[in-house]
Image: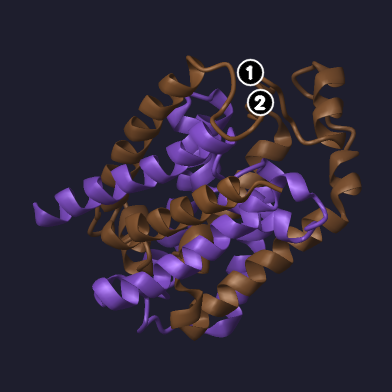
């Protein structure tokens, strides 16, 4: 039960953070879109999106201080897997125009049909991947 | 150059990271547990998404009542676009990577400094995004135009889909 409250509190914080970006800066808070902003830093207009990413890193530092158990310090995974998965995630997010934050949180929160379809699609693909890797191949 | 926008972005980013931490979304086992629907299913991600979307929905209602955001001249939000092949293929590739590593971009950047595999994932995300940006015209120029509305779709491809609300 405690984990459910933690999940809902965390979700509310995510919603507030993304909502703040919407109300103040007038944009959807999509992390993969912000990553693409770092690749064209000339756009002064959206340079604050890079600052959001720095905020994420700073938040990681704050967690190390107040709630270190939340950090993925002891993740053990082959580097090839992490690099391959990261490439798929980065490329796929830009091709579909968003990731878990842009489509999942903001898209569904704004009742966007595209956001909902993308979210259902990546959840289905993710579930199939885990099923194949964990139950079929015994990896993961 | 608006310092206020940067300040808000920094606060929001930090808050976002804390939210990810509190809901245990920084830990790959939480993601794998959620996606493992035939095994020991962990519904945590569903609660996070439910509470997050409901909260964001309230902010969106507030935003819809405003002519302009607090710090910008106009709302720059994705306008409705048809559901096309790029959306489905992109989300599928994203989902495969998400399920494979148990990490997505926000948690990767938040946790990057604390774990080497997470750092390598985060760097690969930047590279994946860069590959897309470099080949953008090629991916966008695919002749697949199911669903019609060619003009709005191709316009949205050359310029990022944006509209004032």
Q: Colour of chain A?
A: purple
What residue sits 46% from the left and 69% below the top?
Answer: A58
What label sits on residue B64 in the rendered view? none
- Output the chain of dot 1: B
> Picture coordinates of residue A126 (x, y %)?
47, 53
> Crowdedness of circle 2 by 10 Å Cα count: few (<14), some, many (20+)?
some
Work out whether residue B140 or residue B160 is closer to the camera in this orientation and state it.
Answer: B160
Marks 1,2: beta carbons within 8 A: yes
> Picture coordinates of residue B102 (x, y %)?
44, 64
User: How does the figure colour the protein chain or chains?
Assistant: by chain
On the image, numbered disc 1 is attached to which residue?
B165
- Output the chain of dot 2: B
Work out whether residue B64 or residue A72 is closer to the camera in this orientation and state it.
Answer: B64
Quarter of the picture containing the C terminus of chain B is top right
Give the quadrant of residue B128: bottom right
What residue sits 63% from the left and 33% below the top?
Answer: B72
Work out whether residue A81 or residue A58 is closer to the camera in this orientation and state it.
Answer: A58
Work out whether residue A1 or residue B70 is closer to the camera in this orientation and state it.
Answer: B70
What label sits on residue B74 in the rendered view? 2
> Crowdedness of circle 1 by 10 Å Cα count: few (<14), some, many (20+)?
some
For marks 1 and 2, give the CA distance: 7 Å
Give the quadrant of residue B162: top right
Q: Colour of chain B?
A: brown
- Residue B3 shows in the view: yes
Instruction: Assign a secondary structure to mark 1.
Output: loop
Q: Do pointers 1 and 2 mark residues of a single chain?
A: yes
């Amino acid at each position: 039960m405690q984990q459910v409250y933690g999940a809902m509190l965390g979700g509310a914080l995510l919603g507030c953070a993304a909502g703040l970006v919407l109300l103040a800066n007038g944009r959807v808070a999509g992390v993969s879109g912000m990553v693409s902003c770092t690749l064209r830093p000339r756009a002064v207009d959206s340079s604050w999106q890079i600052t959001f990413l720095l905020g994420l890193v700073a938040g990681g530092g704050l967690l190390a201080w107040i709630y270190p158990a939340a950090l993925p310090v002891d993740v053990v995974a082959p580097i090839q897997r992490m690099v391959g998965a990261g490439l798929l995630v980065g490329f796929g997010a830009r091709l579909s125009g968003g990731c878990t934050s842009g489509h999942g949180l903001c898209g569904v929160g704004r009742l966007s049909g595209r956001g909902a379809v993308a979210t259902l699609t990546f959840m289905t693909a993710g579930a199939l991947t885990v099923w194949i890797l964990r139950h079929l191949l015994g990896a993961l | 150059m608006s310092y206020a926008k940067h300040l808000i972005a920094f606060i929001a980013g930090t808050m976002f990271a804390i939210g990810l931490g509190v809901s245990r979304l920084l830990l790959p086992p939480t993601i794998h547990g959620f996606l493992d629907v035939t095994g020991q299913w962990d519904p945590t991600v569903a609660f996070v998404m439910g509470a997050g979307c409901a909260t964001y929905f309230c902010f969106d209602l507030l935003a819809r009542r405003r002519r302009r955001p607090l710090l910008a001249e106009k709302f720059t939000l994705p306008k409705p676009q048809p559901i096309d092949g790029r959306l489905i293929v992109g989300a599928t590739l994203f989902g495969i990577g998400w399920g494979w590593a148990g990490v997505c971009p926000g948690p990767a950047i938040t946790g990057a400094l604390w774990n080497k595999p997470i750092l390598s994932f985060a760097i690969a995300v930047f590279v994946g995004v860069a590959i897309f940006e470099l080949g953008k015209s090629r991916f966008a120029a695919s002749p697949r135009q199911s669903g019609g509305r060619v003009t709005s779709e191709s316009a949205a491809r050359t310029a990022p889909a944006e509209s004032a609300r």
